[in-house]
Amino acid sequence: MKQRMEKEQKGNRQGKQGGGVRFLLEGVVVNALMVSYRRFTEVMPEHAHGENIYEIHLVTDGKGTVLLNREAHPAGGGVLYITGPGVLHEQISDKENPVTEFGLYLQLEEDRAGGELIQSLRRQPMWHGKGRKSLPLLAGQILSEQAAERPGSVEKLPHLLADFLIECIRSMLKVPEEGEQLPAPEEKFSAHTVQEENAFLVTDEVFLYEYREITLQELARRLGFSVRQTQRLLYRIYGKSFTQKKLEARMSAALTLLQNSRFSITEISEQLGYSSMEHFSHAFAKYYGCVPSRLRKGK
């Protein structure tokens, strides 16, 4: 990561402007006027920005001191500091190990209030602390897309910039990072209460993955409908009752397992939720016109 960002640095010592890249965050138009990545061998003199201007500073390497409204703070790898309108700031690098910094110069349009993220940024225009782990990776992706001009870069760059700003504000709000990894998968398909127009998707998923033990009452609960409403819905969508649809799903799964797996017929009957192989064989023969063992031999 460090090597790639240092490579990108060659083309970004003075930053890239080009009119900026606009993106939406909580309904507010944000204009990224400049992206830069450089090593500060010289002092960044004291200065402040105007109304609706924010500067994001992510220190990726080196060490030094940053003064925010003339109060000194350390500037080392992983440090993030945000300077908004009127905030005096300057930066002094260590002579032997100068600060390397990814910078983002933003302008927020003021016609909309925004949500929690934007309002938090406006309430706290000065912040210094540890940046989230995702920030260096996002910074590298931004520089890479900006420099390469490969297909899709124009579309991807605004999303990366929005993600970067979100992660910066989350750092400021001290939002825990524990949820960044995927949670353990659920054993069963789950859905919140849905509108009727989404019921097709929910019922399809249920019959696709839960044909073994799904009940009409449980399906009605998932959909947020009564049992009677659910029965009417199934007839409207599939032209079948719940029992017919569940049997169809089980038999379709049975056919797939018989033709494409090495499970025994007893094991297949258990997977499908039948109490015995005989019960399964009877149901299969009634549905397809031949017993499971004959179909498997016929293949």
Image (cartoon, rainbow, N blue to C red):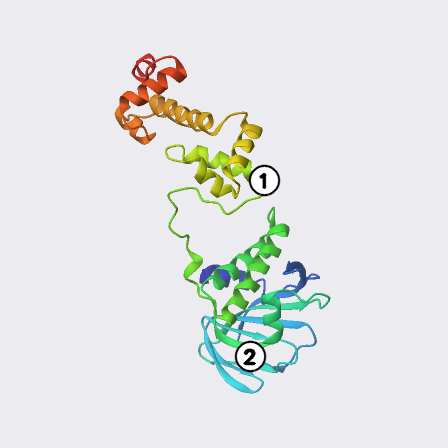
**SS of the residue under disc 1:** helix
| Label ID, residue 196 | 1
- Quadrant of the snapshot with the N terminus: bottom left
Q: Which residue is mark 2?
A: 42
- Amino acid marked by disc 2: Glu
Vertical placement of residue 268 versus 10, above or below: above
Which residue shows up at 31% across the image and 28% down it?
A: 274
Front-lying residue, 190 or 28: 190
Please indicate whether residue 287 sits to the left or right of residue 103 in the image: left
Vertical placement of residue 269 versus 124, above or below: above
Q: Give residue 54's position: percent from left, percent from top.
A: 63, 72
Q: CA distance from mark 2 to mark 1?
A: 63 Å
Q: Give residue 298's position: percent from left, percent from top.
A: 33, 12
Q: Local crowd at mark 1 within 10 Å, few (<14), some, or many (≥20)?
A: some
Q: Give residue 216's position: percent from left, percent from top.
A: 45, 35
Q: Local crowd at mark 2 within 10 Å, few (<14), some, or many (≥20)?
A: few
Please indicate whether residue 114 sits to the left or right of residue 276 in the image: right
| Label ID, residue 174 | none
Q: Is residue 205 visible?
A: yes
Front-lying residue, 257 or 96: 257
Please indicate whether residue 299 sits to the left or right of residue 103 in the image: left
- Amino acid marked by disc 1: Glu
